[in-house]
Image (spheres, grey):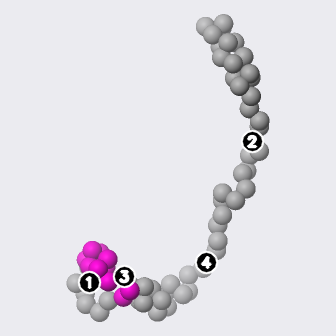
Amino acid sequence: MATPEILSNPFALMMNPAEVLEAVARSTRLDHLQRRICRPLDKPVIAKKEFSMDDYDVAIDNELETD
């Protein structure tokens, strides 16, 4: 990424991804970033309740009766 026109044109960066990856690898600013791994979807926060179709049918029937 030696020329300014390549830096100002993001589409030119797509033409030479190897050069972009090399620039990222030698970037000292990126090396100093704090890194952490976030895995929010590993375990569900709320336990799921087993749902039966009979319960659903009763709830719909009760809803119709109140209207």
Say whether disc 4 or disc 1 marks the residue closer to the N-terminus: 1
For the residues marked 3 and 4, what is the alpha-carbon distance in whole angstroms? 23 Å
In front here: 32 or 53? 53
* Residue 25 in view in this figure: yes
Amino acid under disc 1: Ile
From the viewer's perspective, is 47 left or right of 27?
right
Return the residue at label 2.
Answer: 48
Displayed quadrant of residue 65: top right
Q: Which residues are magenta?
A: 9-19
**Mark 1 or mark 3: which comes first in sequence?**
1
Q: CA distance from mark 4 to mark 2?
A: 32 Å
Which amino acid does the dot numbered 2 rest on?
Lys
| Mark 2 to mark 3 CA distance (whole Å) | 44 Å
Number of other residues with Cα within 10 Å of mark 2, as a class: few under 14, some 14 to 19, many 20 or more? few
The residue indicated by pointer 4 is 35
Is 18 magenta? The answer is yes
Q: In which quadrant is the C terminus drawn? A: top right
Looking at the image, which residue is at 77% across and 35% down?
Answer: 50
Nearer the camera: disc 2 or disc 1: 2
Label 1: which residue?
Answer: 6
Check disc 1 and report its element: helix, strand or loop: helix
> Is residue 53 placed above or below 33 in the rendered structure?
above
Label whose residue precedes the other's in the sequence (4 or 2): 4
User: Which structural element holds mark 3?
Assistant: helix
- The residue sitting at the left extreme is 5
Q: Residue at x 66, y 64 (%)?
A: 39
To which residue does mark 3 refer? Answer: 17
The N terminus sits in image quarter: bottom left
**Residue 23 in the image, given as x and y percentages of width and height:** 41, 89
Q: Earlier in the sequence, mark 3 or mark 4?
A: 3
Is residue 27 in sight in this rendering?
no
Report, in whole angstroms, how far the alpha carbon at label 4 lies from the one at label 1. Answer: 28 Å
